[in-house]
Image: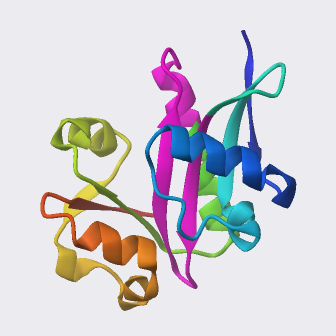
Amino acid sequence: MATFIRKAGKEDLGKLREFLERANLGTDGVNEESMGCFLLLEDEEGALQGTLGMEAYTNFGMLRSLVVTPGQAQKEIFVLFDQMVQLAKEKGMQSLFLATNKSATLPFFELMGFQRIGRGDLPEEFYGSKHIRHVLNVDNSLFLKFSL
């Protein structure tokens, strides 16, 4: 079955929040204003199969909410990341960051071009985000950076 990636719109808010909640992810900051920073992976019927979001700042973005349904091809995840990089470039960003508490995902992210960084290397702007403050309080969080 074919899948398509598109930028989320305000009309997608309910569907996206429900999808994230089913995956046991927080939805702080997922609102009408942030919809332009979420990508949706949908099947031919428009059913949500995956998503990737970004908290956007002037020069940086923090990736969040990567969720795909079981059975999605790794290629589709790569395309989601590639499309997010294009979106960040369109917004004039210099770097993308992400946090994970799953060390098993590090090889995948490193393959994508992310480099591991320390907590102190995160941009100051991030500390105003409730979502990022929550991530910083998780003891085993790892941070990575991708330069655009």
Q: How is the image coloured?
A: rainbow
Question: Considering depth in this image, is 30 or 121 the residue closer to the camera?
Answer: 30
Residue 148 appears in the rendering: no
Please give the name of the residue rendered at 64% of the width and 55% of the height, measured from the top-left corner: 86
Please give the range of residues in magenta.
50-79
Q: Is residue 22 magenta?
A: no
Point out residue 49 in the picture as x, y percentages from the top left corner. Answer: 63, 28
Point out residue 85 in the picture as x, y percentages from the top left corner. Answer: 57, 55
Point out residue 106 in the picture as x, y percentages from the top left corner. Answer: 23, 43
- Above or below for 13 versus 106: below
Quarter of the image for residue 145 reads bottom left
Point out residue 64 in the picture as x, y percentages from the top left corner. Answer: 47, 57
Residue 145 falls left or right of residue 116: right
Question: Considering depth in this image, is 76 or 114 the residue closer to the camera?
Answer: 76
- Above or below for 130 versus 40: below
Please give the name of the residue rendered at 82% of the width and 19% of the height, measured from the top-left corner: 44
